[in-house]
Amino acid sequence: MTQEMPNSLIEFARAAQGALAPADWDYLTEGALPGQAGGDNVHAWNALRVRPRVLRGVAQADISTTVLGARISSPIFVAPNGRATRYHPEGERAIVRATAAKGAGALLASSVGASIGALRASAPNALLWSQLYISGDRGFIKDRVELAHASGAGAIVLTVDLLPDANALKPPPLKPVAWETPKNGEPAPLFTGASIDDLAWLCDISPLPVVVKGVLRADDAAECVAAGARGLIVSNHGGNQVQDAIASATALPEIVSACGGRAEIYVDGGIRSGATILKAIALGARAVMVGRPFSHALAVGGEQGVAACLALLEHELQRAMLLCGASRVSDINRDLLAA
Ligand SMILES: Cc1cc2nc3c(=O)[nH]c(=O)nc-3n(C[C@H](O)[C@H](O)[C@H](O)COP(=O)(O)O)c2cc1C
């Protein structure tokens, strides 16, 4: 049965607030301090102004592109907000089915990593990237990398900006659901002791390209690329780790200028419209990751909700491109933004 879906991201958010238990809504929404929802990310994107280009004879806009050599229907990935079964019983299975149907990408949280085979089986064509944290247990990391590789993942994403108790709110307990593989004792992340040598080791043992998530400075970005990273996600974890961390839109240009030619640069945090995606690409991002809006959509309508949210963002991006005289993603450049 098809259910009518909201037709804006704001309406999805409102409906999700009604659908979720208050503790799950607060966990998803809060920033590094209670009341600081998502930091400055949205404001920083909103402050950038577009200079539309007119009369360019552009009647159609192709929003497809590639990430690490793989074709993708649009430069949009669903970012993990912890376990997606918190927002809907179908959780990640709904996300991978909806993204696979469109040809978009899904980044799977480390906490679902053990179920990647089950997720692949439910959507054989899905573009899946598998996220990991560094722990002191290299055997565990190696097993997870091998599992991701065997399950046809396109990349390993190492998230480097999380301190397990930094969220303002603890995630409320979560019951396992039938389709998932039982969790195989994920060790605690160890960021305070991890170094660039841990990344170099991972790049060395991984048969898949490694992408680092949570970089906000050009010097760190350059070191990650020198250690073997093939991509970087400019991110402040949705504003829920370092209080008052720089917005990802503000950090993006310095990282693109330091490493843009040597690695693919992606960005997340506060992306809430197709015009924002156009701005991110104009600043040099290859693709964007979108977190909370897809969790809202999942809470409201499961697979159908995620598909509707993706269709909204894709349609808005297409429209923004047409209004800026861009017929392909590669036509979007810095010239489209006011200085
Ligand atoms: C509640 C919550 C849980 C998150 N869990 C993860 C996670 O498991 N792994 C990870 O790499 N990032 C995690 N993140 C960060 C998101 O992947 C992403 O960076 C962020 O949601 C992007 O910002 P946006 O929500 O404004 O789009 C989490 C963020 C939130 C808000």
Image (cartoon, rainbow, N blue to C red):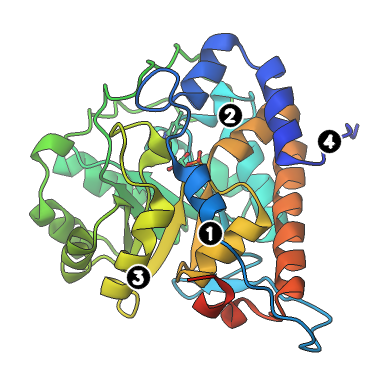
Image: 331 above or below 285: below
- Residue at figure coordinates x 46%, y 23% from the top left: 30
Mark 3 highlights which residue? Answer: 256
Q: Secondary structure at mark 4?
A: loop
Q: Secondary structure at mark 2?
A: loop
Horizontal relation, residue 217 to residue 266: left or right? left
Q: Quadrant of residue 255?
A: bottom left
Give the foreground label among 1 and 3: 1
Residue 179 got which mark? 2
**Type of the residue with mark 1:** Leu
Q: Quadrant of residue 260?
A: bottom left
The Cα atoms of the two marked residues, 1 and 3, are separated by 17 Å
- Residue at figure coordinates x 26%, y 26% from the top left: 164
Mark 4 highlights which residue? Answer: 5
**Type of the residue with mark 4:** Met
The Cα atoms of the two marked residues, 2 and 4, are separated by 25 Å
Question: Cβ of disc 1 within 8 Å of ligand 1?
Answer: no
Earlier residue among tags 1 and 3: 1
